[in-house]
């Protein structure tokens, strides 16, 4: 999902807002339709030993090539990685950004050494309009109030800045009990337009075959 940040100017019609405002993009991938040919290029380029260390190597092989393409095209300046965890996309983003700031909460299960700022998706310790790019991968499903988190992303993102999100449509329960939602195209459109973003693209990356094969890992 590719969006633009809208300048809030009071009440406006969401149906016409895309043509009225044009200030900053956000891109969200959700998993539901078909696998693309660049997956196989990714598998050839990556070390199979490295991929084999993750139970989720198949879905990473689907997501990462598209994510890398969008990061190369849209990421720049100061990148804020919300819910950064182990900061797995640091190397991917490094050629395109000046600074990669990871923010995560104090109770994270991940390696804290990769976290630059401690905070939550609802209260990011940054000033308004202070980052050029937002990256948020597979975090929204873990938030009780995703709308508040999207509002906070909107707050810290500069006018003209970009944001890149990934979210699942089908996935097993993980990091319980903090696993609350799965997202359709229509839910994403409502959520981000409500916060003032202009949607530029929603892109589905996988479908029945990938979802079924990935799910078997957790049977």
Image (cartoon, grey):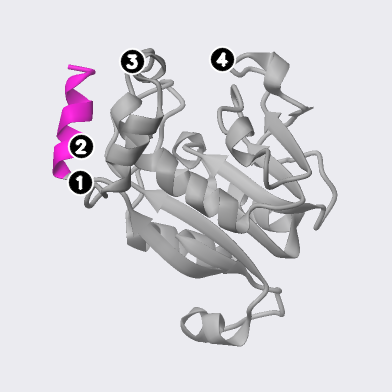
Q: Main secondary structure of the magenta part?
A: helix
- Label 1 crowd (10 A; few <14 / some 14-19 / many >=20): some
Looking at the image, is 67 positioned above or below residue 58?
below
Which residue bears the numbered disc 2?
A: 210
Residue at position x 70%, y 74% from top?
A: 8
Q: CA distance from mark 3 to mark 2?
A: 16 Å
Please give the range of residues in magenta: 208-219
Q: Residue at x 69, y 21 (%)?
A: 114
Q: Are marks 2 and 4 in contact (CB under 8 Å)?
A: no
Pinpoint residue 205: horizontal percent, then vertical percent. 31, 49
What residue is disc 3 on? 52
Residue 52 placed where, x, y %?
33, 15
- Point out which mark residue 207 bears: 1
Residue 115 counted in the magenta span? no
Q: Quadrant of the N terminus?
A: bottom left
Along the polypeptide, which appears first: circle 4 or circle 3?
Answer: 3
Q: Secondary structure beneath disc 2?
A: helix
Q: Is residue 154 left or right of residue 197?
A: right
Closer to the observer: label 4 or label 1? 1
Residue closer to the observer: 21 or 213 = 213
Check if mark 2's residue and mark 1's residue have beta carbons within 8 Å. yes
| Helix, strand or loop under label 1 | loop
Is residue 83 in sight in this rendering?
A: no
Give the secondary structure at mark 3: helix
Crowdedness near tag 3: few (<14), some (14–19) or many (≥20) residues, C-alpha within 10 Å:
few
Q: Is residue 165 left or right of residue 205?
A: right
Circle 4/circle 3 CB separation < 8 Å: no
Q: Above or below — where is 215 with respect to 96?
A: above
Q: Earlier in the sequence, mark 2 or mark 4?
A: 4
Residue at the spot of label 4: 109
In the figure, is residue 127 to the left or right of 114? right
């Amino acid at each position: 999902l590719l969006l633009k940040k809208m300048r809030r100017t009071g009440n406006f019609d969401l149906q016409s807002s895309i043509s009225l405002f044009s200030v900053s993009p956000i891109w969200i991938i959700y998993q539901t339709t078909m696998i693309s040919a660049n997956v196989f290029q990714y598998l050839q380029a990556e070390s199979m030993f490295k991929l084999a260390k993750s139970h989720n190597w198949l879905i990473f092989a689907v997501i990462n090539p598209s994510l890398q393409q969008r990061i190369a095209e849209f990421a720049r300046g100061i990148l804020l990685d919300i819910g950064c965890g182990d900061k797995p996309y640091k190397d991917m983003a490094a050629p395109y950004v000046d600074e990669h700031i990871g923010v995560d909460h104090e109770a994270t299960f991940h390696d804290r050494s990769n976290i630059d700022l401690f905070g939550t998706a609802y209260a990011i310790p940054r000033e308004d309009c202070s980052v050029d790019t937002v990256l948020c991968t597979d975090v929204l499903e873990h938030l009780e109030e995703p709308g508040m988190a999207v509002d906070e992303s909107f707050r810290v993102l500069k006018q003209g800045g970009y944001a890149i999100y990934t979210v699942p449509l089908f996935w097993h329960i993980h990091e319980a009990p903090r696993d609350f939602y799965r997202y359709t195209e229509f839910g994403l459109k409502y959520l981000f337009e409500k916060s003032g973003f202009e949607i530029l693209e929603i892109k589905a990356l996988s479908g029945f075959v990938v979802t079924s094969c990935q799910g078997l890992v957790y049977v």
